[in-house]
Amino acid sequence: MLTLEYHFNEPHTRTFYGYEPGDAFYEALIEAHRDLDEEQSALVNARLILLLANHIGDVGLLREAIRLAREDVVGG
């Protein structure tokens, strides 16, 4: 089952608030897109999706994530 609650962590890092590792992820994501045009940014996103999907490896979980992502964009 897909985890929908915040689930960020950074091994060997102590945080005082659960969202701090999530903030680090978003900061890294924003930095990855710095100085890219719209097409380059879309390519980085596509490559990141494929890399993370390969890491997850569970096709059922990936299908659920795709369904939820699309549902949020086009509605139920």
Image: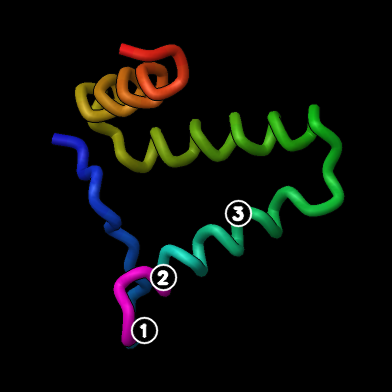
Q: Where is residue 57 in the image (x, y as percent from the top left)?
A: 29, 34
Q: Is residue 18 above or below residue 46?
A: below
Find the distance from the CA under tag 2 to the CA under tag 1.
9 Å
Tell me if label 2 and label 1 are in contact, CB under 8 Å. yes
For image coordinates 50% across by 61% down, the residue present is: 25
Q: Which amino acid lies under the numbered mark 2 shown in the image of this protein?
A: Pro
- State the separation of the CA atoms marked 3 and 2: 12 Å
Q: Name the element at disc 3.
A: helix
Location of residue 44 with respect to 46 vertically, above or below: below
What residue is disc 1 on? 13
The question of residue 17 being in magenta is answered with yes
Q: Earlier in the sequence, mark 1 or mark 3?
A: 1
In the displayed orientation, state which residue is furthest to the left: 1
Q: In this view, does 55 lie to the left or right of 49?
A: left
Mark 1 crowd level (few <14, some 14–19, many ≥20, 10 Å Cα): few
- Looking at the rendered structure, the kind of residue marked 3 is Leu
Kind of residue sitting beneath label 1: Thr
Q: How many marks?
A: 3
Q: What element carries label 2?
A: helix
Give the residue at mark 2: 21
Which residue is rendered at x = 79% and y = 53% of the image? 34
Nearest the viewer among 38 and 13 is 38
Viewer-nearest of labels 2 and 1?
A: 2
The reply to whether callout 1 and callout 3 are in contact (CB within 8 Å) is no
- Tell me if label 3 and label 2 are in contact, CB under 8 Å: no
Residue at position x 32%, y 86% from top? 16
Read off the residue under disc 3.
29
Q: What stretch is highlighted in magenta?
A: 16-20
Chief secondary structure of the magenta portion: loop
Q: Position of residue 58 (x, y in %)?
A: 23, 31
